[in-house]
Amino acid sequence: MFSERFMCSLYCYLIVKYKLIFIILFIIFGLLLVFVASHLGFVLFDSQCETGGCSGQLCSSASVLKGMMTTCEWKPEYRCNTDCAVRNFRCSFDSEFRQLCIDCIQECRNQIDLYSGNASNYREFESCTIRCSER
């Protein structure tokens, strides 16, 4: 039979040899996973997410944003679009903050008469919406 010393050296040799192969395969698999996931619309890293659109109303991966066009209007709710990042393998804004912010802007609309034609009401509404979007 094989001596214990021989078995250890053979075992150590195989570990070193296959460890390198395992590391190379792991890197290739990881790169392949990122490539396939990005083409299927999935994102894995926050660095893949970008804010886009004329008013910053979109949050998506750079590859998706390339072909998108938006209109250039401004809505106070766009102030609520913050923290474009990966959530559930998709790029999206912080939905919890966004909802709180939109509710706050609606409260501003309910409190301030924007249809009176009074310019100070518009300035007051603008200040109110800015406070809503601040964390």
Image (cartoon, rainbow, N blue to C red):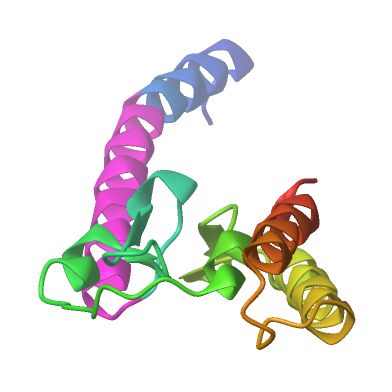
Q: Is residue 22 above or below residue 59?
A: above
Q: Is residue 2 left or right of residue 113?
A: left
Q: Position of residue 43 (x, y in %)?
A: 40, 64
Q: Is 58 on the left or on the right of 75, as rendered? A: left
In front of the other: 53 or 59? 53
Q: Quadrant of residue 42?
A: bottom left
- Is residue 135 positioned above or below 87 on the image? above
Is 114 or 74 nearer to us in this picture?
114
Q: Is residue 111 above or below residue 22?
A: below
Residue 35: horizontal and vertical position, in percent? Answer: 22, 61
- Residue 61: % across, % down: 31, 63
**Which x, y percent locates residue 64?**
22, 72
Q: Nearer the viewer, residue 118 or 123?
A: 118
Quadrant in which residue 129 is drawn: bottom right
Identify whether 43 is placed above or below 45.
Answer: below
Q: Is residue 122 left or right of residue 49?
A: right
Residue shown at 53%/23% (left/top)?
7
Region of the chain picked out in magenta, as a range: 17-41
